[in-house]
């Protein structure tokens, strides 16, 4: 989204303060942050969360604990 000129923002992932200043409503604040601003949803970190879940599944198959502390996927 375009950030108004009167709002100070650094390059990179937005801080919580910046998101709140832009009117963000948090929908999820876990391994991934999902916010809604002006009716649009923004999500970050989804790739990292997916990789962590895959790694935890592999750790578990090897008899280890879920080192990234992700939740087990639902059984089908």
Image (spheres, helix red, strand yellow):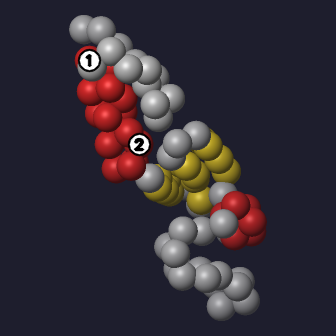
How crowded pointer 1 is (Cα within 10 Å; few <14, some 14-19, many 20+) is rated as: few
Q: Quadrant of the C terminus?
A: top left
The residue positioned 32% from the left and 26% from the top of the image is 59
How crowded pointer 2 is (Cα within 10 Å; few <14, some 14-19, many 20+) is rated as: some
- For label 1, the SS is helix
Residue 24: which numbered mark, if any?
none
Q: Is residue 39 above or below residue 61?
A: below
Residue 55 figure quarter = top left
67 or 49, nearer to the observer: 67
**Residue 35 seen in the figure:** yes
Q: Are marks 1 and 2 in contact (CB under 8 Å)?
A: no
Q: Is residue 27 above or below residue 22?
A: above
Sequence-wise, the earlier of marks 1 and 2 is 2
Residue 63 screen position, x and y as percent: 33, 15
In three-dimensional space, the C-alpha distance between marks 1 and 2, rounded to whole angstroms, equals 18 Å
The residue positioned 66% from the left and 66% from the top of the image is 15
Residue for badge 1: 61
């Amino acid at each position: 989204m375009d950030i108004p000129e009167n709002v100070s923002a650094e390059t990179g992932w937005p801080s919580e303060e910046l998101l709140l200043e832009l009117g963000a409503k948090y929908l999820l604040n876990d391994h991934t942050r999902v916010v809604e601003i002006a009716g649009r949803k923004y999500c970050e970190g989804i790739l990292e969360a997916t990789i962590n879940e895959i790694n935890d599944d592999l750790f578990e198959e090897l008899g280890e604990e879920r080192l990234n502390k992700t939740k087990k996927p639902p059984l089908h």
